[in-house]
Image (tube, rainbow, N blue to C red):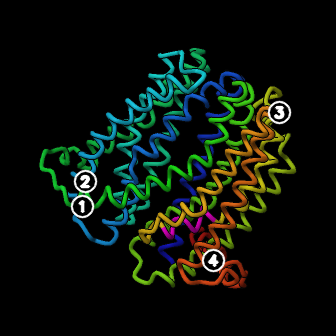
Amino acid sequence: MNSFLGDLIRVLLSNIIIILFGLLTSIITARWIGPEGNGVIAGLAIYPSLFMTIGSLGIRQSTTYFLGKGIYPEDKIKTAITQIWFVTTVISMIICYFLMTYFSKSGFNHIWVLLSLAPIPFTLFVTYNSGIFLGKNDIKTFNKVNWIPPLIILALTLILVVVFKADVSGALIAGIGGPLFMALLMLFKNDFLKSFNLNVDLKIIKSMLSLGLVYAFSLLIINLNYKADYILLDKLSSSYELGIYSKGSAITQYLWQIPMVLSTIVFARSASSKNDKEFSYKVAQLLRLSFILIGIASLILFLLSKFIIVGMYGKEFESSTVVLNYLLPGVIILTIFKVMNMDLAGKGKPYVVIKAMIPSLIINVILNVLFIPKYGAAGSALCSTISYGFAGISFLYYYSKEVDIPISEIVKFRKTDFNPIFNVINKIKKGS
């Protein structure tokens, strides 16, 4: 448990840094570009972010699983990754260009489209190869992969948007810098360059794709749940409403960093765990702790929402307050999924998520189509909360069946639940 706590502290610090850099970037784009410009950026980002879920083919997750279980050697996995990456990058760029050009309101501006597409190859390369570090439980290196790109994006946003006043184009160019730098660093610093060769091992590629495609499909359904509101706002409303929604929704993404701190470690350790059921009991404990932390943070956000939104983004984004408040209940309930899904994914069972997320996605789309034309961003936020609530509760049921632990055992609080927190506090005290 001590090594788990050590990883937890490292990931926590890394995520705090990521949140800080992300918030500062978000504040800059809000104050220098405004609601409509932010709506344009959000609209352009929808399809690359969605299609990178498909294009990633679940390779990071399957890499973590195969390396964590010791099924294939690292050098052969790396070679297979680079070969898959080359093919998927080309396909992803072509299909994504088509989607953005014909389905996004901002697709008429081909320069913006190309700038939005440019991060795809670098992001895919980083995503694929970061599974190596998770499979080896190298959380320290995995953290660097996560926080360095946001730092570079923040620095470039300051230079291009604030200093040179490059507006939407500047923000899009800044988004390229982080993934590009990390991809080059991985290429030359971690021996990935040696993995580029023509020795194709079809057995490994087939194994990674067969498991990875299940991960990819489940991740696609998950991300469609998160992005359906963006897509439908882009089609059924205005860039202004999408900009308002994007900033209110962005705050909730930072809330989810709390369970994501846990889920990163859960996934890595679940992939290499020798006693699956015992580990699932630990995950249930982490879920109960996450509920408390997310609940407290959500209450504070709700009480201070107007002050936080206007203070960070300016008076123009005051309407984002309603979006944030409507999303908070759904965010709390979906914490169930955020924590526990990584346990099943680490066990090689990503298909379970599909049972909960497809009905939730259908609910989300139907409600958004009905609510957006009349209520705009606020209506979309309410629809998302309803679908998130359904997804979280139904996933708890399926998880309970899969790991053979009663729901009452999963959700019942115990005094021992707080031992990890006390251990962290004691560790900090000893260190000081």
Residues shaded magenta = 337-344
Q: Which badge, 3 or 1, comes first in the chain's sequence?
A: 1
- Report helix, strand or loop for mark 1: helix
Residue 339 at x, y = what percent?
A: 59, 65
Task: Give yes or no for contact between labels 1 and 2 (Cβ–Cβ under 8 Å).
Answer: yes
The amino acid pointed to by label 2 is Lys
Instruction: Mark 2: give few (<14), some (14-19) or many (20+) Cα within 10 Å.
Output: many
Mark 4 or 3: the one toward you: 3
The answer to if 341 sits in the magenta stretch is yes
The amino acid pointed to by label 3 is Lys
Q: For residue 78, which numbered disc appears in the image?
A: 2
Task: Give yes or no for contact between labels 3 and 2 (Cβ–Cβ under 8 Å).
Answer: no
Relative side of 76 to 257, left or right: left
Q: For residue 285, which numbered disc appears in the image?
A: 4
Q: Which of the 4 quarters of the picture holds residue 106?
A: top right
Mark 3 or 2: the one toward you: 3
Q: Is residue 191 visible?
A: yes
- Image quarter of the C terminus: bottom right
Q: Which badge, 4 or 2, comes first in the chain's sequence?
A: 2
- Report helix, strand or loop for mark 4: helix
Please tell me which residue is depicted at 45% across the width and 41% down the height of the picture.
52
- Report helix, strand or loop for mark 3: helix
